[in-house]
């Protein structure tokens, strides 16, 4: 019985790999493998319409299947899964693969303070796709193509114990990643690197006290069952998350028309990801959390402002040093481009508001109209 079961597992794994590396012409579903929950805003609001539109415009020649919840890949193994053809596309977090993607990790490492996710998301994507050749080459070396990116909405401290002021963060173990690790240290906490999904289990077991993350995580990762207090102070927005990172062989097999079908619908997908998947979800989930009894604590902004100022004063130097240590040749130039793009998109953002169509049109005009799908 054990031998038959082992043989079944080997055959199943072989079939999965064969499916994942065959061509679209064979009529199989292309696999988008996601480690986040199907309830996550990107999975619920952004990707399904994209896949439907691509299928329609290619007359069914290209069909995508979304496999969420970590069934095929974890957060840390997604890039390897794309590279090796286990999945055709996925959601890549640069800080989990900083050695392989130093350029993207650099852009993601910039903590943009405030609450303008619309501007941050577009500025980061524009920087990676148009002004960071090293970023794109990093993906090429991993047999991958960066087709679209987004920013998470502002991160907040969400805690299981009652935390109502800065001093009470001292000694608290806090899930964090990327530049957030250094920020948590400056706030007096003990940074504990792990994925959001791992953080939930750690919080339930008492291994961490707080998580530095987006309000939407209360639902998408079920933190609402453990968190009791949220510090109502935004602690940075990170961009350049690889929403649609595709296996290069899969991409190269597409006809020019099929590539165009994908690229045409990336701007509205990105707009939905931010406005529907993050900003509106955050507002809705915050209301639900408050109704459930989770306290959103107003704090002394001056205390937190002082920490943010200290952090920002040395942030760029730390990012540059880290990027160079991972082999990036010109991180200063990329950071300068990102700062320019942030300034431009902060000016565009008020007119866009939370209008998906206006946002999609701006992303198309400023980014995708300048790309050649056949040279990506």
Image: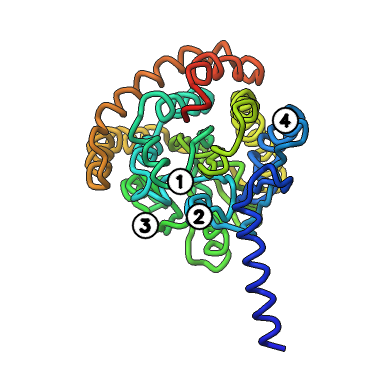
Distance from disc 2 to disc 3, alpha carbons, whole Å, reads: 36 Å
Task: Give the structural element (helix, strand or loop) at label 1.
Answer: loop
The reply to whether callout 2 and callout 4 are in contact (CB within 8 Å) is no
Residue tagged 1: 143
Residue tagged 2: 84
Distance from disc 3 to disc 4, alpha carbons, whole Å, reads: 50 Å
Q: Earlier in the sequence, mark 2 or mark 1?
A: 2
Query: Dot 2: few (<14), some (14–19), or many (≥20) neighbours within 10 Å?
Result: some
Distance from disc 2 to disc 1, alpha carbons, whole Å, reads: 8 Å
Q: Earlier in the sequence, mark 2 or mark 4?
A: 4
Q: Residue at x 47, y 27 (%)?
A: 375
Residue 190, label in figure: 3
Query: Dot 1: few (<14), some (14–19), or many (≥20) neighbours within 10 Å?
Result: some
Eye-nearest disc, 2 or 3: 2
Instruction: Left or right? Give the position of 330 relative to 66.
Output: left
Residue tagged 4: 58
Distance from disc 1 to disc 3, alpha carbons, whole Å, reads: 36 Å
Q: Position of residue 323 (x, y in %)?
A: 27, 42
Distance from disc 1 to disc 4, alpha carbons, whole Å, reads: 24 Å
Query: Dot 4: few (<14), some (14–19), or many (≥20) neighbours within 10 Å?
Result: some
Q: Earlier in the sequence, mark 1 or mark 4?
A: 4
Compared with residue 67, is residue 206 higher up or lower down, i.e. above or below? below
Q: How is the image coloured?
A: rainbow
């Amino acid at each position: 019985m054990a031998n038959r079961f082992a043989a079944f597992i080997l055959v199943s794994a072989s079939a999965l790999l064969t499916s994942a590396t065959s061509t679209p012409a064979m009529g199989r579903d292309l696999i988008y493998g996601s480690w986040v929950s199907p309830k996550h805003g990107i999975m619920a609001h952004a990707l399904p319409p994209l896949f439907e539109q691509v299928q329609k415009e290619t007359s069914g020649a290209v069909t995508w299947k979304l496999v969420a919840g970590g069934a095929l890949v974890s957060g840390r193994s997604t890039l390897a899964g794309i590279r090796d053809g286990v999945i055709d596309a996925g959601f890549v977090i640069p800080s989990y693969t900083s050695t392989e993607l130093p350029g993207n990790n650099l852009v993601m490492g910039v903590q943009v303070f405030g609450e303008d996710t619309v501007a941050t998301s577009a500025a980061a994507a524009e920087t990676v796709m148009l002004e960071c050749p090293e970023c794109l080459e990093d993906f090429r070396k991993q047999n991958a193509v960066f087709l679209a990116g987004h920013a998470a909405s502002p991160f907040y401290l969400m805690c299981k114990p009652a935390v109502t002021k800065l001093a009470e963060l001292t000694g608290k173990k806090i899930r964090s990643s990327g530049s957030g690790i250094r920020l948590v240290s400056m706030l007096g906490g003990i940074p504990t690197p792990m994925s959001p999904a791992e953080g939930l289990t750690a919080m339930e077991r008492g291994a961490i006290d707080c998580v530095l993350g987006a309000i939407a995580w209360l639902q998408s990762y079920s933190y609402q069952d453990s968190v009791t207090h949220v510090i109502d102070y935004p602690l940075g927005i990170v961009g350049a998350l690889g929403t649609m990172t595709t296996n290069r062989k899969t991409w190269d097999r597409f006809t020019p028309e099929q590539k165009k079908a994908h690229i045409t619908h990336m701007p509205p997908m990105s707009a939905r990801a931010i406005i529907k998947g993050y900003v509106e979800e955050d507002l809705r989930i915050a209301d639900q959390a408050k109704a459930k009894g989770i306290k959103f604590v107003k704090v002394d902004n001056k205390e937190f402002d002082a920490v943010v100022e200290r952090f920002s004063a040395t942030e760029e130097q730390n990012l540059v040093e880290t990027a160079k240590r991972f082999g990036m040749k010109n991180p200063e130039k990329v950071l300068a481009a990102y700062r320019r793009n942030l300034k431009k998109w902060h000016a565009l953002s008020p007119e866009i508001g939370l209008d998906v169509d206006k946002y999609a049109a701006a992303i198309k005009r400023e980014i995708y109209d300048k790309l050649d799908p056949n040279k990506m």
